[in-house]
Image (spheres, rainbow, N blue to C red):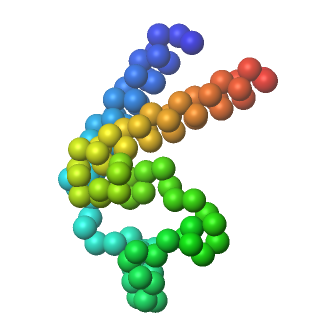
Amino acid sequence: MDKKDTYLIVVAVVICIIISCLSPYIASGDPDGLEKSAEDSGVPEDFSVEEINGIPEAIFPDYAFANDPDNQVLQIVALVIGAIITLALGYAVAEVVRSRN
């Protein structure tokens, strides 16, 4: 990997971390389409998919730790961890594909 590629990767990681840090403050307070559809159809707010069909809860439900969606610092930490994991997985896949060519 040359110096230009390394610079691009570092800039991409920094931009992802900045977006992760700002997103709890600029995100809409209105529910997204899935939550709005659930509200319109009368699904209770404390509905658990695990109770219905055994699917376990998410690691970071509502992008927060310890089921505390109002704590913005924990939301930021969860978002940064998710962004770094996603970028690392993407990089790993790119390296595997590149090595096969």
* Front position in the image: 45 or 10: 45
Position of residue 39 relative to residue 84, above or below, is below
Residue 42 visible in the current orientation:
yes
What is the tally of numbered marks visible in this picture?
Answer: 0
Residue drawn at x 29%, y 45% as measured from the top left: 74
Residue drawn at x 58%, y 35% as measured from the top left: 90
Q: Based on the displayed image, in which of its 4 quarters is residue 68 positioned?
A: bottom left
Q: Position of residue 95 (x, y in %)?
A: 66, 24
Q: Position of residue 15 (x, y in %)?
A: 34, 34
Residue drawn at x 50%, y 71% as measured from the top left: 48
Residue 43 vs residue 97: left or right?
left
Residue 1 vs residue 36: left or right?
right
Q: Position of residue 33 (x, y in %)?
A: 43, 74
Q: Based on the displayed image, in which of its 4 quarters is residue 79 positioned?
A: top left
Q: Quadrant of the N terminus?
A: top right
Q: Residue furthest bottom?
A: 41
Residue 37 visible in the current orientation:
no
Q: Quadrant of the C terminus?
A: top right
Residue 81 vs residue 21: left or right?
right
